[in-house]
């Protein structure tokens, strides 16, 4: 009987992890999309910007999105910050990578590995930051 209960608890835990990672990755992708729209708006309003600046801006936006995906995922699951953050960043990388494969006819392995590192590392950092964030408690005076 206890084996059945343990198996149900593990299954429920896996479902909670999967749900939090997928929702956190979607939130991170939404942050990336919003930041990309903001940057494109700024570039249109500014006129012409140096082309050498685009990869740096893209890497910064990827880092911000990865961080937010880890942060949102761990805020839902509340524990295992590094693991959940790395998973969320990895899922974000897969989404961006598959989208890039569909739109591109060339592949640059170094850039792909750099993006993978950016998404996963910043996702892990976001998860660790969120799991270590202290919750403010208010004292009730009666």
Image: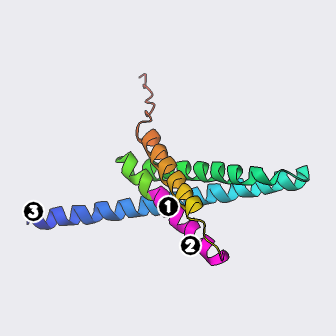
**Residue 75 point in image, percent of width and height:** 45, 48
66 left or right, relative to 47: left
Gap between marks 3 and 2, in whole Å? 42 Å
Query: Which is more toward the observer, 114 or 103?
Result: 114
**Disc 3 or disc 1, which is closer to the eye?**
1
The residue positioned 24% from the left and 62% from the top of the image is 10
- Which numbered disc covers residue 59? none
Q: CA distance from mark 3 to mark 1?
A: 31 Å
Give the x, y percent position of residue 52: 76, 51
Identify residue for label 3: 2
Q: Is residue 142 above or below residue 41?
A: above
Q: Earlier in the sequence, mark 3 or mark 2?
A: 3
The nearer-to-camera label among 1 and 2 is: 2
Residue at mark 1 to residue at mark 2: CA–CA distance = 18 Å
Local secondary structure at mark 3: helix
Q: Quadrant of residue 14?
A: bottom left
Residue 95 is inside the magenta segment: yes
The residue to which callout 2 is attached is 98
| Circle 2 SS class | helix
Callouts 3 and 1 close, C-beta under 8 Å: no
Instruction: Determine whether label 3 and label 2 are within 8 Å by CB.
Output: no
Q: Residue at (43%, 30%) from the top-left corner?
A: 137
First-in-chain label (3 vs 1): 3
Bounds of the magenta segment:
88-105
Q: Do we see residue 100 in this rendering?
A: yes
Within-10-Å neighbours for mark 2: few <14, some 14–19, many 20+: few
Could one spot residue 71 in this view of the protein? Answer: no
- Would residue 47 be found to the left or right of residue 33 on screen? right
Q: Is residue 129 above or below residue 35?
A: above
On the image, numbered disc 1 is attached to which residue?
Answer: 23
């Amino acid at each position: 009987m206890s084996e059945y209960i343990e198996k149900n608890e593990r299954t429920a835990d896996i479902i909670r992890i999967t749900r939090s990672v997928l929702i956190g990755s979607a939130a991170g992708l939404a942050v990336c999309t919003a930041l990309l729209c903001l940057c494109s708006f700024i570039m249109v309003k500014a006129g012409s910007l140096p082309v050498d600046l685009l990869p740096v801006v893209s890497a910064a936006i990827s880092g911000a999105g990865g961080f937010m995906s880890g942060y949102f995922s761990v805020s839902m699951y509340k524990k295992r910050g590094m693991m959940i953050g790395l998973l969320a960043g990895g899922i974000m990388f897969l989404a961006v990578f598959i989208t890039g494969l569909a739109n591109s006819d060339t592949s640059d392995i170094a850039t792909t590995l750099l993006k993978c590192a950016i998404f996963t590392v910043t996702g892990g950092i976001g998860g660790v930051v969120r799991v270590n964030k202290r919750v403010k408690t208010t004292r009730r005076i009666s």
